Amino acid sequence: MLVKLVGIHKVKAKLASGERVTYYYAWRGGPRINAKPNTRGFLAEYHRLTRARPDAPGKGTLSELVREYLKSPAYRNLAASTKKSYDWAIDKIEAEYFDLPIAALGERGARKMLLEWRDTTFTSTPRAGDMVMAVLSKIIAFAVDREDIDRHPLEKIAKLADSTRKDVIWTDEQVAAFKAKAPARMVLALELARWTGQRQGDLLALTWSAYDGTHITLRQGKTGTRVRVKVAQELKALLDAQKRTAVTILTNRSGRPYTEGFRSSWAKAMEAAGVKGVTFHDLRGTFVTLAHREGASIREIAEVTGHSEKDAETIIRKHYLAGDSAVTRLEKRNEKLAKL
């Protein structure tokens, strides 16, 4: 019940229309609770908003487990972009199970309950469901490690999404269509990704000081790995022609570093160009193929992109080795035979 929630601050107001309303806040001067009072949604939002307070409610429940996990190195050492995804998933988890006793996670039936929730809630968004389960699995592993529970109910679960995008690449026709219609700042983003194989977050944070005219040097946000990428002539010509309006290479339409809005701008550019079936992330796989065509080894490619050598080889075999490479080898053999 609402009256049992400690610290709730209630404010009555009169709207311009004459209607009288009541607003609820997690505490006096604290954030507003937007959910309808006396509902599970209200309780869940209250728990989420008060999780950082010393007197946070929910002792012995999933809410407490989430609080402890968020304070642990397992979460604090994540890259900022990864934390953003985790935070989204944690909000989904806590909204459903904020009052679930921690001990219940280790009991028989917990696996069935969690999987049924995933299967019914994320039917139309399987990748989102897999993300939520992956984060929940890490939180539960944290509980097992602390000996709060004896067994992990989500070990070896199959994913809802049955495909991977590791081997999806942009075709030359898609690249050409995008470059013909997209704004210059979006074309620069495409070329940086296509010729360096780096993740979107790392490219948005990339500064001009990282480019020395021949190479781009950066530390990957997700892996912490320091990489040095040779700049292809096509990308070099584009970079050298840019006006440096900000400390970062990629900027918004105002010439300032991106803090938000890149994804929506990219989506609009994709729609205007009529390019479908590929994403910005797929440019990493495209780089793998381009790099191999230029003679880079699988190990060299993996060191730059952060792929495993196995994943890099899978991409190459699907899009290069099984096609152009075989033909090229055959042509060279025929040329040698013709000279005999």
Image (cartoon, helix red, strand yellow):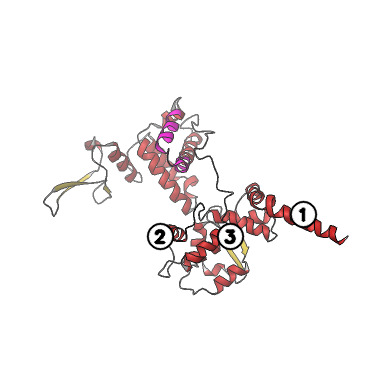
User: Marks 1/2: CA distance?
Assistant: 48 Å
**290 or 129, nearer to the observer:** 290
The location of residue 153, given as percent across then percent down, is 48, 31
Q: Earlier along the polypeptide chain: callout 1 or callout 2?
A: 2
Q: CA distance from mark 1 to mark 3?
A: 24 Å
Q: Is residue 296 magenta?
A: no
Residue 286 falls left or right of residue 254: right
What residue did someone put label 3 on?
A: 172
Q: Does dot 1 land on a helix, a strand or a loop?
A: helix
Q: Residue at x 23, y 40 (%)?
A: 37
Q: Which secondary structure class fits the magenta region best?
A: helix
Q: Residue furthest front?
A: 338
Q: Nearer the viewer, residue 217 or 28?
A: 217
**Looking at the image, is mark 3 or mark 2 earlier in the sequence?**
3
Residue under label 2: 261
Q: Nearer the viewer, residue 83 or 149?
A: 83
Residue where numbered disc 1 is placed = 330
In the image, is 68 to the left or to the right of 324?
left
Q: Residue at x 58, y 68 (%)?
A: 235
Q: Do the residues under discs 3 and 2 have CB atoms within 8 angstroms? A: no
Q: Are marks 1 and 2 in contact (CB under 8 Å)?
A: no
- CB under 8 Å between discs 1 and 3: no
**Which amino acid does the dot numbered 1 rest on?**
Leu
- Mark in the foreground, 1 or 2: 1
Magenta part of the chain: 112-132
- For badge 2, the amino acid type reads Gly
